[in-house]
Image (spheres, rainbow, N blue to C red):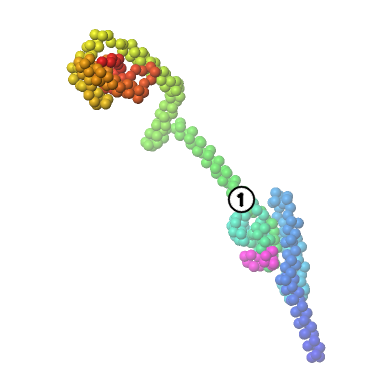
Amino acid sequence: ILQTLKSKASNELMINSVAFQDHITKTVLHPDYLCPWIKKTSKYTKVGDEHEEREYVLEPHPPPLTLAQRMGLIAFHKERLTEDEWTRVKKRSVQQEESANPCSICREEFRLQPQVMLSCSHVFHRACLEAFERFSGRKCCAICRKEPYETRVIHDAARLVRHKCATRIQACWRGYRTRKWYQKFSKNICPQDKKLRRKFFETKLQELNDSFVRYCHTNTEAFLSDIDRSLSSSRRVFQQLERMVVSKPREDDWERIKSQGIQRGVWECPICLTALSNPDQMATDESKHRCRRTVLLSCSHLFHQLCLEAFETFSSFTAHSRPTCPLCRSTYNKKLL
């Protein structure tokens, strides 16, 4: 009897060991046994679901039980969650504001990206949860470490984002409409405050001034062109008058101009600052001072002939103007003494 009991105990221990080894092999060494849908994610992706915003469970069929689970050595969920249970789970998730907070895996907002809710009421990006399951090799919640769990596609974050965007658009439009209404209202109603009333009348006066300036037809370019034409005509008239006034002196005038130059008593060329020849001695000393002859201008100033010719050469005169005296700046006629 003892041998029979010992053999039964050893057989039971051996069966339990095999069951545990089978469970460990299938759950740890071969994680695809519990996550067979990871490699077939596109199988459950439907184009119409995102537009319809229909909630559905990603794993319609639970993974097969291991030997240890069938023997009762490892706990397992016998039944899937019903719609009422999913409703309670979602209510708890809404109370915890899971969809309003960022994803706990990537720490980014959900926005319009696909999101999933676990049976433990935690919410993640669908892509983040699939990556977490693929790299961890276990079907374990990233927050509470509950395993296994069921996954359900929801769209709460997308609705929150659309509601927030619509609220911002409405606020922007209402603000724009209110500002336009206030601008129109403030143009017609005089305020009661002194500073605002002063600003109101300043604005009105500025508008009147602007309208008056617009009504006054002024062409600045044409006005400036008329001024330029008038100046050119005036210059031509004065130049013609100057040529008419400056006429060649007669012989009597030259004698009078010569006497004025002698009375001045300046016997030095203003250009080269060397001595001039005395007009009374020019006849006797003509051969001696042939290269330094003196020129008398109609303004009674005396210069060396070569100095005046050099001055006229280096001075710039236009075609319609006459040379001017280096001292008094008046136009002249010259006579060689």
Look at label 1 and name its amino acid. Val
Say which residue appears at 69% left-offset and 64% top-offset: 134
Say if residue 90 shows up in the picture: no
Q: Is residue 85 above or below residue 252?
A: below
What is the crowding at mark 1: few (fewer than 14 residues within 10 Å), some, or many (at least 20)?
some
Position of residue 29 in the picture relative to residue 165 (left or right): right
Say which residue appears at 72% left-offset and 61% top-offset: 38
Quarter of the image holding residue 107? bottom right
- Residue 82 in percent (x, y) is at 72, 61
Position of residue 108 in the picture relative to residue 55 (left or right): left
Q: Is residue 294 above or below residue 12?
A: above
Task: Return the residue at label 1.
Answer: 161
Q: Nearer the viewer, residue 191 or 6?
A: 6
User: What's the magenta bit mostly, secondary-structure-wise?
Assistant: loop
Say which residue appears at 41% left-offset and 26% top-offset: 209
The quadrant of the rendering that contains the C terminus is top left
Q: Nearer the viewer, residue 71 or 295?
A: 295
Quarter of the image holding residue 116? bottom right
SS type, badge 1: helix
Tell me if residue 143 is in the magenta stretch.
Answer: yes
- Residue 168 in percent (x, y) is at 56, 46
Q: What stretch of residues is rendered in magenta?
A: 133-146
Say if residue 67 shows up in the picture: yes
- Residue 103 in percent (x, y) is at 61, 59
Say which residue appears at 73% left-offset and 50% top-offset: 48
- Residue 296 in percent (x, y) is at 26, 17
Q: Nearer the viewer, residue 226 or 122?
A: 226
